[in-house]
Image (cartoon, grey):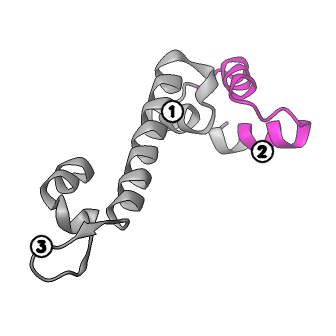
């Protein structure tokens, strides 16, 4: 029995949480591959501590990236000599480059 059939069985029974899929796999004597265990960790981060840590770290970096992209487009003063408005991304290009890389 493959993981796909186990997931289908869990969906039919209405038990589609990560813990139930693991229990079904153990009961059926199916050893999950590394790929299937990683998929389960990404799909159900509450099932283990490393998956939960990865979930929050990923969310943090997504939030930082979104904030940096928004702040990069905000006007950040007048350019000396020309009088044109300058965005924070133009004014602090190196800092934003380092932050987004």
**Splitting the image into 4 quarters, where does residue 19 fall?**
top right
Q: Marks 2 and 1, Cα distance to the nearest angstrom?
A: 25 Å
Element on which disc 3 rests:
loop
Say which residue label 1 marks. Answer: 55
Q: Position of residue 44 (x, y in %)?
A: 63, 32
* Crowd rating for badge 3 (residues with CA inside 10 Å; few <14, some 14–19, many 20+): few
Judge by depth and name the residue closer to the eye, 25 or 65. Answer: 65
Residue 35 in which image quadrant: top left
Is 51 positioned to the left or the right of 18 in the image? left
Instruction: Report the residue at 56% width, 18% height from top.
Output: 48
Residue 38, can we see it? yes
Residue 4: mark in rendering: none
Q: Is residue 58 left or right of residue 28?
A: left
N-terminal label among 1 and 3: 1
From the top left corner, tell me how far across and down residue 17 is, in percent: 75, 31
Q: Residue at x 14, y 83 (%)?
A: 82
In this view, 58 is above or below 71: above
Mark 3 = which residue?
Answer: 80
Q: Of the residues under marks 2 and 1, which one precedes in the sequence?
A: 2
Please, is residue 87 above or below residue 10 in the view? below
Compute the Cα span from label 2 to label 3: 64 Å
Tag in front: 2 or 3: 3
Which residue is denoted by mark 2 in the rendering? 8
Task: Please give the name of the residue rendered at 12% of the width and 56% of the height, measured from the top-left corner.
Answer: 94
Element on which disc 1 rests: helix
């Amino acid at each position: 029995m493959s993981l796909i059939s186990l997931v289908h069985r869990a969906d039919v029974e209405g038990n589609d949480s990560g813990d139930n899929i693991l229990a079904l796999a153990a009961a059926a004597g199916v050893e999950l591959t590394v790929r299937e265990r990683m998929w389960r960790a990404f799909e159900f981060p509450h099932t283990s501590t490393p998956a939960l840590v990865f979930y929050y770290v990923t969310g943090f970096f997504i939030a930082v990236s979104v904030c940096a992209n928004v702040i990069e487009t905000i006007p950040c003063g007048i350019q000396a000599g020309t009088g044109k408005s300058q965005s924070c991304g133009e004014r602090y290009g190196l800092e934003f480059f380092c932050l987004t890389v």
